[in-house]
Amino acid sequence: MSPRHAHRPEPRGHWLLLIIVVSAVAAALVFEGWTTHEVASQPTRRPCTSPMPKAADTGKPVVRIGGGGTVETAGMPDRTVALTFDGGPDPVWTPRLLDLLRGHHAHATFFLSGAQAVRHPELVKRIRAEGHEIGSGAYTGSDLGSASSPRTRLELSLTQTALAGTAGINTKLVRLPLTTQADTMCGGEWTAARRAADQGYLLVAADRPLRKPERGVVRQYSQNDTGYAEANKLLRNRKIEKFATVSEGLGGPPANTPVSTVGRLQGEALIQVQGIGRIFVQAMTWVLGIAGALALLRLALLVFFARSHVRRLQRFRPGAPWLREVDEPVTVLIPAYNEEAGIESTVRSLLASTHWQLQIIVIDDGSTDRTADLATWIDDPRVLVVRQPNAGKAAALNTGLVHAHHDIVVMVDADTVFEPDAIHRLVQPLAHPAVGAVSGNTKVANRRRLLGKWQHLEYVFGFNLERRMFEVLECMPTVPGAIGAFRRDALMGVGGVSEATLAEDTDLTMALWRAGWRVVYEETAIAWTEVPTSLGQLWRQRYRWCYGTLQSMWKHRRALREVGQAGRFARRALPYLFLFQVALPLLAPIVDVFALYGVLFANPVEAIGVWLAFLVLQLLGAGYALRLDKERLTALWAMPLQLFVYRQLMYLVIIQSVVSALFGTRLRWHRIHRSGSAADRLTAGPAGSAGSAERLSSN
């Protein structure tokens, strides 16, 4: 193992931090959703199932329930009106109502929503400063008659906390939401009234609208244009001697009392928490919009450039028919470490190649199994087995270059099998003298299980469709290790395969661009690779890929300032990789939480509709990619499921990789367990595979 990749313990504290952050965000969103009454609670009250007690049904609007269940009622004296306003504070109408009351030297009682009080603390302070009385209208303003006992207590206690933080007071007055006259406190509302009374509240309803104001009334208005007009009309009634608060009209002690320092601090903390939740909701709305727009843009670009790639195949790209056919001999390098499950199938598939002359070099990188022996036992003069102590894949490839006899070098993985014409097709773009490397088309062999189908879709829809776009834009960032062709002098010119990163294929490709070579994609050169069969193996593989890609991007960052072909490559490929493979996935956990928030607290039909629309677009894009790769569309059924498990695993991999890179962690080579299932694909593959199977058996 190279000293550069000496293993250090991987960071783990960030997972605890991630859990804390996501939990805090989820809690803030849940609280914000509940307090804005977007949760699925009753927006209207249920019909009464039983009448209120006769002792309370006296027609008077103020009800006091004693400890023993005794009930007392009261109302305003003659020529006294208690103006009360429900809801709010409202940023538009509350200031207008306060100006109206001040113009008439009148006081009123405002039954405030705790959630609205937290949103507009300056209006609560103004209400209190101008001598008005404040009562509780519950926190969310939803029907308490259908709420549980804990929910009722929470609604009332949070409102008290909100008033403590905004105005420094507690209140003893409460008006049950969605009630008007006292006789509407029946059924479930009477149960809620008793719960409120147990906490020391005085219940305030309103007199019937037909009762004349001069007889003394409690009037109930909303904080809107209608309430403003009605209050303005009543304030001009000359038969009224006094406009008082509820407490003043009853001749009792003030209903608002100062809170302790602890109570005020708790209230201020509540304001901060809801403020953070509100800001986060607003910010995530923008982030979600931007992320959605970028996702749509990426999908549109992939499809557009894939179509452009198809149109230019026979016209502009290197390897067009009027260029000479490349039939030079080829050296194939197969680095292998403990690959006994698949090495024989890989070598035999190469020996069955239609390309007329091959040198196949198997570099055994210190395997502890029979990898080298199995390769040696293949009795063919074209196969050379080189053994070396374990030093890593890059070192093995460099060892192979030393033994290469030919000017064209193909690098392949030891878990991959090849179509008979794959090597010949792969090297054809090298007819153009500016092309230094060619990427082949890697397909998933073991795709029968769900995890394999997910990776199959990713290879076709993600990797291969992106390669078409990268070729059109002339910024191919990676020639995959599974199948890639190179000019030997181009490899020597960049110093061989670098051992500085764990993504040696990406590092090498970027180095070739910076050296002035072009890199293209040959979609007809098909190789079948074996992908991980468990989530643990997939995690290790993608962790190495992502970490190595980050290393390569950082290593070649200076290319962004370079001129010519190297600069164009860097300015096109590196921002794309950073934006779509690093930045957006880092936001994915919070975006998922916010999407769940939309389903639970916003409009679930709209949220699910948006999700389905994105899914349909992705299915269409994936279907187009499958058609281009001549694959069956039946694999699309697994794509919706991919969004729930596979996607989350991928962004967790990216988070781990970014944190590891920031902490300077050095990873060891993560090898996955092989079963040799790639060889089965040649027997059961598409058209042309039967011939492949015959060639393998004949060898």
Image: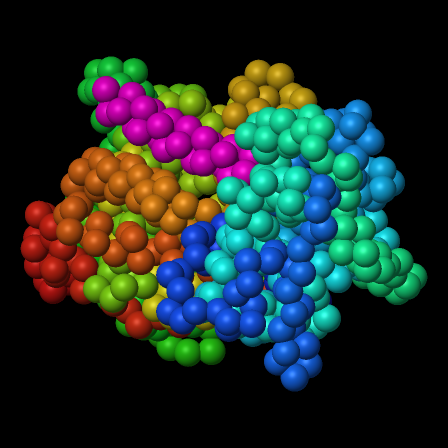
**Percent from the top left, x then y, of residue 347?**
28, 60
Question: Is 641 rendered above or below residue 533?
Answer: above
187 or 613, nearer to the observer: 187
Question: Is 501 rendered above or below residue 183?
Answer: above
Q: Which residues are magenta?
A: 285-311
**Percent from the top left, x then y, of residue 9?**
69, 70
The residue positioned 7% from the left and 55% from the top of the image is 690
Residue 294 is a magenta residue: yes
Residue 377's image quarter?
bottom left
Question: Is 496 rendered above or below residue 188?
Answer: above
Question: Is 202 rendered above or below residue 501?
Answer: below
Can residue 599 be seen here? The reply is yes
The residue positioned 34% from the left and 56% from the top of the image is 642
Say which quadrant the N terminus sits in: bottom right
Residue furthest to the bottom: 68
How many numbered callouts? 0
418 or 489, nearer to the observer: 418
**Percent from the top left, x then y, of residue 391?**
58, 63
Can residue 347 be seen here? The reply is no
347 or 471, nearer to the observer: 471
**Percent from the top left, x then y, of residue 464?**
33, 40
Residue 407 is a magenta residue: no
Magenta segment main secondary structure: helix
